[in-house]
């Protein structure tokens, strides 16, 4: 059995550490201890072998060079098929989320969705334009209905190109067409990958991965983009809001309802219902001071971004929230929901409630979501939670709750930089061109209990800031930064290098931007497109000095995002372990072949410092290719630099203490 890690080795988040100690005290298992007890399978993980179970002549296990499966499949074919299937599953999950939002928009436009309405007409009209829906003289309801139907049709489309593909820079579209990865229909591309990876089909690694890229494209420029855009139409396009994050947002004297998963549909209605005087009165009748909502994972990001609802944290906080003993109900929809939750909830008074027609878990209560009666369902769920308040036992709530300011949609960034007079990405491009900003990095993705929670996300963020790199974030990576206080502007400016600091001070833009949930990685595609179109940084996403990082990834969705980002021209670096390490060919295709054909690539780098080095090297390489001045941190913003210089002269240990000692 592997060794049990200390709480500090399991997480750098103090609130998590406190509850991990509590879990040890109570003898409760969590993903952290289960990861200690179960070493990752070295063959299934792709590190020292490859496993294929695509047919029942196997499963076949390849652990040495030259070995093949019963059917003759090589390690490269198996690695490519496994990667492609993971990308298809991830694309399916994101895209199906988008489909459900389209159903809700349709019901709302037809006046049949209780509680929902069209909140952002400007966005509705913009999306209508992309879908070629004429808007002249039509009511928002009619446009909404036509947009919803067009969105749904993108899923079932058999031939042609997805509508949002033409939002990308021209040159990017040409690269996609040339390499043959323009997605035809969202469902079709997922089915295509499942078909071609069935036993006895596509067995050419690069060709399999090309299918996987087309599928990922159907996610990034299809399903996920639909999810983001239609959510904005229904619930409003985000703009900065003050919120709070970490387990300390749970209240010891209110009914705590934790909303976990990914979709904004039901959670938005729960937010609305929680403000109803009757329900608040019902809560007080049970002895509580009120109803307190808190999110986990991307459902959290959705309602944090739009409604300012507090976040109890990221992926690895889900079990810890229950261990506070303070949660009356945990309500989940889809994705990233650990099966351990209902069992853990049973150790406390917590009611565990599944709501998606797609997700049921043994031991949980199921109250099924239906967009036609969402508000009534939300009320029923809140009543279940309130009824449970008197059953609460001993409570341990860490006092960690950090302020944060999320909500940087591309629309808002545009506005923030240019001001209302002339919204523009010009100041951002100028800052990159002058070298004040060295480049842009998206640090996104999950937590993974195989590595220390939040450590890589936050270390990389700090180091990138010091190197004058602007950091944008989504998903669990964003919540990691939030917990460390890096999403308030001032705190992050402490770390920012002189040039970046100068730009941020002049424009009011914080150096770390929380752009939303995981489907909102499509907002980053839009920002990069705007930057390419603004001029001065080439004319394609691949020209921009930008890198995507997923240092603590774990989900198939993360691989789908990585693949569409690489297809879109970005250099993407994943941490933890390489699931394709055992196949040199697949590693080569995803790195070199993709870079040659598409300008983007996807690599796996285990070590944080190596990840940082490669990130900066890529940025500098792109700067040089654009003929931009070499990055030189000494050129800008001398004010305040004495502090950084003094710190940088210190020996490593003291430097770490001086920089991070106060924040940890
Ligand atoms: Fe899930 Fe989106 Fe990963 Fe977090 S980051 S663990 S996928 S919640 Ni998408
Ligand atoms: Fe083995 Fe080939 Fe079947 Fe895979 S498809 S399990 S390699 S026989």
Image: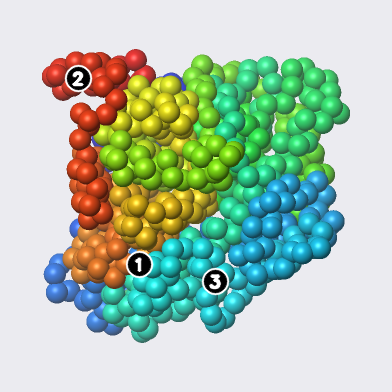
Spatial CA distance of label 2 from label 1 is 48 Å
Spatial CA distance of label 3 from label 2 is 51 Å
Who's the residue at 69% across and 45% down the image? 235
Q: Is residue 110 above or below residue 418?
A: below
Looking at the image, which is closer to me, 39 or 570?
A: 570
Who's the residue at 20% across and 28% down the image? 634
Image quadrant in which you'd find residue 153: bottom right
Looking at the image, which is closer to me, 7 or 630?
A: 630
| The N terminus, quarter of image | top left
Q: Which residue lies under the disc numbered 2?
A: 645
Q: Viewed as shown, does residue 360 lie left or right of 480? A: right
Who's the residue at 60% across and 71% down the image? 154
For label 3, the SS is: loop
Q: Which residue lies under the disc numbered 1?
A: 82
Res 312 seen here: no
For label 2, the SS is: helix
Looking at the image, which is closer to me, 56 or 444?
A: 444
């Amino acid at each position: 059995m592997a060794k049990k890690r200390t709480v500090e080795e399991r997480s750098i988040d103090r609130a998590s550490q406190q509850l991990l100690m509590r879990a040890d005290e109570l003898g409760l298992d969590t993903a952290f201890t289960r990861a200690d007890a179960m070493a990752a399978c070295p063959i299934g993980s792709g590190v020292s072998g490859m496993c294929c179970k695509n047919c029942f002549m196997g499963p076949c296990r390849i652990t040495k060079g030259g070995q093949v499966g019963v059917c003759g499949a090589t390690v490269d074919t198996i690695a490519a098929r496994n990667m492609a299937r993971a990308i298809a599953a991830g694309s399916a999950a994101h895209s199906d989320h988008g489909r459900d939002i389209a159903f809700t928009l349709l019901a709302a436009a037809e006046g049949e969705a209780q509680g929902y309405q069209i909140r952002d007409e400007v966005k509705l009209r913009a999306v209508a334009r992309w879908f070629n829906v004429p808007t002249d003289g039509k009511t928002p309801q009619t446009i909404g209905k036509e947009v919803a139907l067009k969105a749904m049709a993108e899923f079932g489309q058999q031939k042609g190109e997805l509508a949002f593909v033409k939002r990308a820079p021209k040159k990017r579209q040409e690269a996609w067409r040339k390499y043959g990865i323009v997605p035809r229909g969202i469902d079709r591309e997922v089915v295509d990958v499942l078909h071609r990876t069935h036993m006895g089909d596509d067995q050419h690694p690069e060709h399999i991965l090309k299918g996987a890229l087309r599928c990922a494209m159907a996610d990034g420029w299809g399903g996920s983009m639909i999810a983001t855009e239609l959510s904005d139409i229904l619930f409003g396009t985000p703009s900065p809001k003050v919120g709070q994050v970490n387990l300390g947002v749970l209240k010891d004297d209110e009914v705590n309802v934790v909303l976990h998963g990914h979709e904004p549909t039901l959670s938005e209605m729960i937010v609305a219902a929680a403000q109803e005087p009757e329900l608040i009165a019902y809560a007080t009748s049970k002895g509580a001071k009120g109803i307190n909502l808190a999110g986990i994972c991307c459902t959290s990001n959705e309602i944090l971004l739009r409604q300012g609802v507090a976040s109890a944290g990221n992926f690895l906080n889900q079990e810890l929230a229950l261990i506070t003993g303070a949660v009356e109900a945990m309500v989940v929809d889809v994705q990233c929901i650990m099966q351990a939750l209902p069992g853990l909830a049973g150790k406390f008074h917590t009611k565990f409630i599944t709501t998606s027609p797609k997700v049921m878990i043994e031991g949980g209560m199921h109250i099924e979501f239906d967009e036609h009666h969402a508000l009534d369902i939300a009320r029923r769920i809140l009543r279940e939670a309130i009824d449970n308040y008197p059953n609460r036992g001993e409570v341990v709530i860490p006092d960690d709750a950090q302020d944060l300011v999320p909500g940087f949609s591309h629309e808002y960034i545009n506005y923030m930089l240019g001001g209302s007079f002339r919204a523009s990405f010009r100041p951002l491009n100028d800052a990159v061109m002058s070298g004040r900003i060295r480049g842009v990095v998206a640090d996104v993705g999950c937590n993974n209990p195989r590595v220390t929670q939040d450590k890589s996300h936050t270390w990389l963020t700090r180091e990138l800031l010091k190197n004058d790199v602007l950091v944008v974030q989504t998903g669990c990576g964003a919540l990691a930064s939030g917990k460390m206080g890096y999403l308030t502007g001032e705190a992050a400016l402490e770390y920012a290098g002189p040039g970046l600091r100068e730009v941020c001070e002049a424009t009011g833009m914080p150096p770390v931007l929380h752009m939303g949930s995981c489907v909102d990685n499509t907002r980053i595609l839009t920002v990069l497109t705007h930057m390419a179109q603004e001029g001065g940084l080439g004319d394609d996403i691949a020209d921009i000095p930008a890198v995507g990082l997923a240092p603590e990834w774990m989900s198939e969705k993360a691989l789908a995002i990585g693949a569409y980002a690489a297809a879109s021209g970005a250099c993407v670096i994943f941490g933890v372990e390489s699931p394709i390490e055992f196949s040199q060919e697949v590693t080569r295709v995803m790195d070199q072949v993709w870079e040659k054909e598409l300008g983007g690539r996807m690599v796996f780098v285990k070590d944080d410092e190596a990840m940082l080095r490669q990130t900066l090297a890529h940025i500098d390489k792109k700067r040089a290719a654009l003929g931009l001045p070499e990055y030189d941190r000494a050129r800008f913003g001398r004010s305040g630099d004495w502090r950084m210089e003094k710190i940088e002269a210190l020996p490593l240990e003291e430097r770490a203490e001086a920089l991070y000692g106060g924040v940890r």
